[in-house]
Image (cartoon, helix red, strand yellow):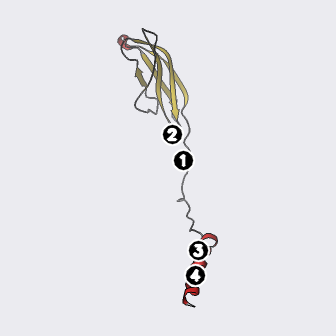
């Protein structure tokens, strides 16, 4: 009889855990909710200070997001090299990335993210 009772109790616990017991729900604290979006009013261009080819990018409105410059460079032997700035920027700051030595900037661009 004891064996049947332990099987019944363990079966009941298994069924209750699958069907019955629900977790406790919690809500986010009240207050303002901030929605972050991709930056807007963004611009990019080839950039070559002192003869070092690369690209420069900036966004006038960060909207809580970030951006960085990217560039496709071409070596003198015809090989394409893609580069992107290391640091994400926000708030109108310039993002600059340079091409490797013995290459030139072919296509500048910008990469954005919402946070």
- State left or right for residue 96 relative to residue 7: left
What residue is rendered at 56% in x and 45% in y?
A: 35
Mark 2 → mark 4, Cα distance in angstroms = 57 Å
Q: Earlier in the sequence, mark 2 or mark 1?
A: 1
Can you tell which of label 4 and label 1 is closer to the viewer? 4
Can you tell which of label 1 and label 3 is closer to the viewer? 3
**Residue, disc 3:** 14
Mark 3 → mark 4, Cα distance in angstroms = 11 Å
What residue is rendered at 54% in x and 56% in y?
A: 31
Q: Is residue 11 above or below residue 110?
A: below
Instruction: Report how many numbered discs are placed on residues in the image.
Output: 4
Q: Mark 1: which secondary structure?
A: loop
**Residue, disc 4:** 7
Mark 2 → mark 3, Cα distance in angstroms = 47 Å
**Other-residue count near label 1 (Cα within 10 Å), few / some / many at <14 / 14–19 / ≥20:** few
What residue is rendered at 41% in x and 22% in y?
A: 97
Marker disc for residue 61: none
Q: Earlier in the sequence, mark 2 or mark 4?
A: 4
Can you tell which of label 2 and label 3 is closer to the viewer? 3
Return the x and y of residue 102 as percentages of the image width and height: 37, 11
Q: Earlier in the sequence, mark 2 or mark 3?
A: 3
Mark 2 → mark 1, Cα distance in angstroms = 9 Å
Return the x and y of residue 7 as percentages of the image width and height: 57, 81
Return the x and y of residue 10 as percentages of the image width and height: 56, 79
Asked if the residues shown at circle 1 and circle 3 are in contact, with their CB atoms under 8 angstroms apart, the answer is no
Asked if the residues shown at circle 2 and circle 1 are in contact, with their CB atoms under 8 angstroms apart, the answer is yes
**Residue, disc 1:** 34
**Other-residue count near label 4 (Cα within 10 Å), few / some / many at <14 / 14–19 / ≥20:** few
**Residue, disc 2:** 64
Return the x and y of residue 25 as percentages of the image width and height: 57, 65
Q: Mark 2: which secondary structure?
A: loop
């Amino acid at each position: 009889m004891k064996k049947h009772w332990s099987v019944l109790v363990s079966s009941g616990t298994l069924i209750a855990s699958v069907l019955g017991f629900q977790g406790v729900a919690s809500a986010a604290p009240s207050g303002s909710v901030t929605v972050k979006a991709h930056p807007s009013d963004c611009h990019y261009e080839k950039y070559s200070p002192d003869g070092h080819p690369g690209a420069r990018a900036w966004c006038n409105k960060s909207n809580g997001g970030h951006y960085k410059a990217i560039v496709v460079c071409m070596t003198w032997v015809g090989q394409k090299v893609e580069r992107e700035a290391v640091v994400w920027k926000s708030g109108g700051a310039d993002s600059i990335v340079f091409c490797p030595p013995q290459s030139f900037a072919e296509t500048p661009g910008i990469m954005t993210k919402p946070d």
